[in-house]
Image (cartoon, rainbow, N blue to C red):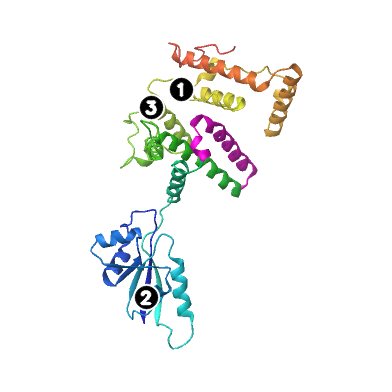
């Protein structure tokens, strides 16, 4: 019995990155492949002869099955399924003329985790290139901005609904926005690409996790960001993260990174959280007067009802609660930044933020 081995490869890796087992097989048996397959040039460059045949021709299956010896077929990017089907049909036929051949599948290379992201980048490139989609060709960072916000909220909806299948879809839509903006930037001069985006993210994650990525253990006390805590829990990680971020800002305000475009409630919560973490709460952040409704807040439901009542009262007074809270948050942010830059910064009560 002879063998016909289909060597399967992924188009998402360089063609010469084959497994040791695949290279060994190709060096020992005659090798066949579809004409023009990317892997053919790589195998020939290694000094191995490759005979090119048409995988869609019925004769190719007959040639391979009747060779009377072990052979290897270098499958193309699509797996050459038509050829595999003809081979299977001929081997399934009863009778004395049925070839005595054993079919094997050998993964010569396979997709690493994240390999399909390369496909997403290629599709985005096709859409923006000449002959692609007219709508995609007209877009700019500014025209895409509303879609970025919309997709982020749809992703949030899927999370809040606990819909895992929908979350996968929405994350794909959100990823599209990242790919789109990166592709637009790539067309600028000078520009940057999705690789720069990914590279910057990798550098940031490694830099902000010295307890994970520093070889031989992190020298936290000698870290460029200053004395960091030894990490035993999530609070230590958060502390070190903020210390490293402060060093990266190079003197810029800690509050400059709080985006003003987010919804007013999230903006207020972000400012309060950051001020409290930085010790600025002692200076006195704006707070509503204590009353029976506020004192009754003990859980999510009572907090939601209180907020609902506040919105209703604002409507009665003709006040837009989003605009009012956003204006106050902007003022608080300005006060926090001023207090941060003053000589009294960092001292309890160093600035009066009750405005």
- Judge by depth and name the residue closer to the eye, 66 or 171: 66
Task: Write the residue at 62% across / 47% down.
Answer: 163
- Judge by depth and name the residue closer to the eye, 342 or 140: 140
Number of other residues with Cα within 10 Å of mark 1, as a class: few under 14, some 14 to 19, many 20 or more: some
Q: Is residue 254 magenta?
A: no
Q: Quadrant location of residue 303?
A: top right
* Residue 150 x/y as whole percent: 59, 35
Question: Which mark is on residue 254?
Answer: 1
* Residue 282 x/y as whole percent: 54, 17
- Judge by depth and name the residue closer to the eye, 314 or 247: 314
Q: Is residue 136 magenta?
A: yes
Q: Are marks 2 and 3 in contact (CB under 8 Å)?
A: no
What distance separates the C-alpha of mark 1 from that of mark 2? 69 Å
In this view, 35 is above or below 130: below
- Which quadrant would the C terminus be assigned to in this image? top right
- Which quadrant would the N terminus be assigned to in this image? bottom left
What distance separates the C-alpha of mark 2 from that of mark 3? 62 Å
Number of other residues with Cα within 10 Å of mark 2, as a class: few under 14, some 14 to 19, many 20 or more: many
Task: Write the residue at 39% across / 56% down.
Answer: 11
* Residue 121 x/y as whole percent: 44, 45
Question: Which mark is on residue 64?
Answer: 2
Q: Tell me where the magenta segment starts and ends, as one range.
A: 134-163
Question: Which mark is on residue 248?
Answer: 3
Precedes in sequence: disc 1 or disc 2? 2
Q: Quadrant location of residue 149?
A: top right
Q: Are marks 1 and 3 in contact (CB under 8 Å)?
A: no
Label 1 sits on a secondary structure element that is loop
Label 3 sits on a secondary structure element that is helix
* Residue 347 x/y as whole percent: 47, 15
């Amino acid at each position: 019995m002879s063998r016909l081995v289909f060597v399967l490869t992924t188009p998402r890796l360089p063609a010469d990155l084959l497994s040791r087992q695949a290279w060994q097989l190709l060096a020992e048996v005659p090798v066949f492949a579809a004409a023009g397959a990317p892997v053919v040039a790589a195998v020939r460059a290694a000094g191995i002869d490759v005979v090119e045949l048409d995988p869609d021709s019925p004769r190719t299956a007959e040639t391979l099955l009747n060779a009377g010896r072990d052979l290897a077929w270098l499958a193309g990017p699509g797996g050459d399924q038509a050829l595999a089907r003809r081979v299977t049909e001929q081997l399934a036929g009863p009778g004395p003329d049925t070839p005595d051949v054993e079919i094997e599948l050998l993964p010569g290379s396979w997709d690493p985790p994240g390999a399909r992201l390369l496909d997403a980048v290629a599709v985005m490139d096709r859409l923006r290139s000449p002959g692609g989609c007219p709508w995609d060709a007209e877009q700019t960072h500014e025209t895409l901005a509303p879609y970025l916000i919309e997709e982020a909220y749809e992703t949030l909806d899927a999370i809040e609904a606990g819909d895992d299948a929908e979350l996968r879809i929405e994350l794909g839509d959100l990823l599209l926005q990242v790919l789109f903006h990166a592709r637009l930037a790539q067309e600028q001069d000078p520009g940057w690409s999705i690789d720069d985006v990914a590279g910057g993210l990798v550098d940031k994650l490694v830099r902000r996790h010295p307890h994970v990525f520093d070889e031989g253990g992190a020298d936290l006390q000698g870290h460029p960001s200053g004395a960091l805590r030894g990490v035993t829990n999530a609070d230590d990680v958060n502390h070190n993260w903020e210390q490293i971020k402060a060093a990266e800002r190079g003197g810029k305000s800690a509050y400059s990174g709080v985006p003003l475009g987010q919804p007013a409630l999230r903006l207020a919560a972000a400012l309060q959280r950051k001020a409290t973490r930085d010790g600025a709460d002692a200076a006195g952040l704006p707070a509503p007067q204590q009353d029976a409704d506020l004192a009754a807040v003990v859980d999510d439901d009572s907090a939601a009802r209180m907020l609902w009542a506040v919105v209703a009262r604002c409507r009665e007074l003709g006040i837009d609660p989003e605009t009012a809270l956003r204006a106050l948050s902007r003022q608080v942010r300005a006060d926090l930044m001023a207090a941060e830059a003053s000589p009294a910064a960092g001292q309890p009560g160093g600035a009066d933020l009750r405005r």
